[in-house]
Amino acid sequence: MTRTFFARISRRSRLLLATGLLTVIGVAGSLVATSAPAMASAVGCTRYGSVYIPVVKFSIPTGQYCFGINGSGATVNFTDGSVDTAWIVNYSETVRFYDGHGHNYYTYNGPVHAGYAYSYHYWQTSIHGSAVVGGRVCGTLMSSGTAVATACESIL
């Protein structure tokens, strides 16, 4: 008779495995339960990355990026962003404005926050002025110069 995986490992190993799994589930629960502040005229969020838990055959997102635009019509007061993550390294945000034909007419590269960051972080840009009606604005979360997640909003 074949013994299952759990029957073959020691009681101590099972306890450590269960503790680790509960820790990961707790982190995932905090990612799902937290939301960005409702400060912008439009906000979009996207989850990124994943950690695969083979015991339960399940993937858990490692972070959530939210991007918003504050203003009315073509007037932009500012854009804002947030990240809620287990970890991210050297993060920054790039904001791009597109016209109705998808042509990029303005790009803003935010500062790099050096080192590892954990948990929730919120920021606002100093972007203000008039945007092209019928276009869109997209925020991209970067980690060490690589795009991690993008969220876009329409400019009506």
Image (cartoon, helix red, strand yellow):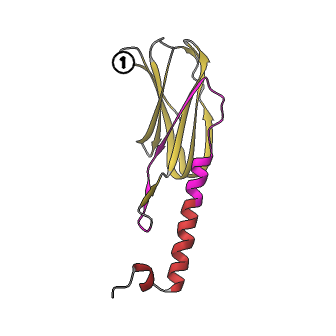
The region drawn magenta spans 26-55
x, y (%) of residue 97?
45, 21
- Whether 54 is drawn above or below 126: the answer is below
Residue at 55 percent of width and 50 percent of height: 85
Which residue is outermost to the left?
1
The residue closer to the viewer here, 99 or 90, is 99
Density class for disc 1 (Cα within 10 Å; few <14, some 14-19, many ≥20) is few
On screen, 9 above or below 146?
below
135 or 29: nearer the viewer: 29
Does the magenta run of residues contain 100? no
Which x, y percent locates residue 63?
Answer: 51, 48
User: Left or right: where does residue 32 sit relative to residue 138?
Assistant: right
Q: Is residue 90 above or below residue 1?
A: above
Mark 1 lies on a secondary structure that is loop
Identify the residue at horizontal 45%, vertical 65% (top origin): 56
Asked whether 46 falls inside the magenta stretch, the response is yes
Q: Would you name the residue on which mark 1 appears?
A: 103
Q: Residue furthest bottom?
A: 1
Question: Which residue is located at x 57 percent, y 72 percent?
Answer: 19
Q: Amino acid at mark 1?
A: His
